[in-house]
Image (cartoon, helix red, strand yellow):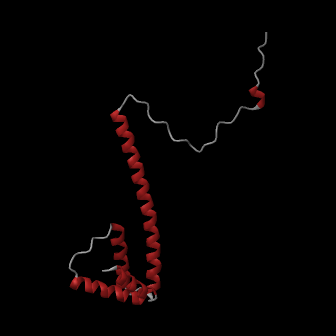
């Protein structure tokens, strides 16, 4: 679909209420099943799950307001899970990098740890700071 047509359709959809939007979605899915020349790429696991929940709610005749609120909550949860996934990948990459450095050159000193946010050690109390002269 050309970008101009896609933008025109999007502008028309913006003003529709949710129940009309679902009717449009149903019609688009019907057209896709009947006339699609190629298969759309499969969505990721989170998207498939969310769409499945949304379709189940619609089949159960749940109000569009409740569906919209549920989908908003699920989208926020997907954002959190995406962040956790990204953090897990980062940790795994760091482990692989460190392990490959160790196996490549086992006699080299390991890299220094990153600076921590902990405060420096406290100075000893004033009375202990001064040394007492030794007693004869």
Q: Is residue 103 left or right of residue 64?
A: left
Quarter of the image holding residue 8?
bottom left
The image shows residue 110, relative to residue 55, as above or below, that is above
Give the x, y percent position of residue 91: 42, 49
The image shows residue 105, relative to residue 79, as above or below, that is above
Could one spot residue 38 in this view of the protein? yes
Q: Is residue 110 left or right of residue 2?
A: right
Residue lying at the far top of the rendered structure: 136
Tell how many labels.
0
Quarter of the image with the C terminus is top right
Give the x, y percent position of residue 108: 40, 30
Could one spot residue 63 in this view of the protein? no
| Residue name at image x 38 percent, y 48 percent | 93
Give the x, y percent position of residue 63: 44, 87
Give the x, y percent position of residue 35: 21, 84
Q: In the depicted view, which residue is nearer to us: 101 or 89?
A: 101
Q: Is residue 129 left or right of residue 33?
A: right
Q: In the depicted view, which residue is nearer to us: 38 or 69?
A: 38
| Residue name at image x 21 percent, y 76 percent | 38
| Residue name at image x 37 percent, y 86 percent | 22
| Residue name at image x 39 percent, y 40 percent | 98
Quarter of the image with the N terminus is bottom left
């Amino acid at each position: 679909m050309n970008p101009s047509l896609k933008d025109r359709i999007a502008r028309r959809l913006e003003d529709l209420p949710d129940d009309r939007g679902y009717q449009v979605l149903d019609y688009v899915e019907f057209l896709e099943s009947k006339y699609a020349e190629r298969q759309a790429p499969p969505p990721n696991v989170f998207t498939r799950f969310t769409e499945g929940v949304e379709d189940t709610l619609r089949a159960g005749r749940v109000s569009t307001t409740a569906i919209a609120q549920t989908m908003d909550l699920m989208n926020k949860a997907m954002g959190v899970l995406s962040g956790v996934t990204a953090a897990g990948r980062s940790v795994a990459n760091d482990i692989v990098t460190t392990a490959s450095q160790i196996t490549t050159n086992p006699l080299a000193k390991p890299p220094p740890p990153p600076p921590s946010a902990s405060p420096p050690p406290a100075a000893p109390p004033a009375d202990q700071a001064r040394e007492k002269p030794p007693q004869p």
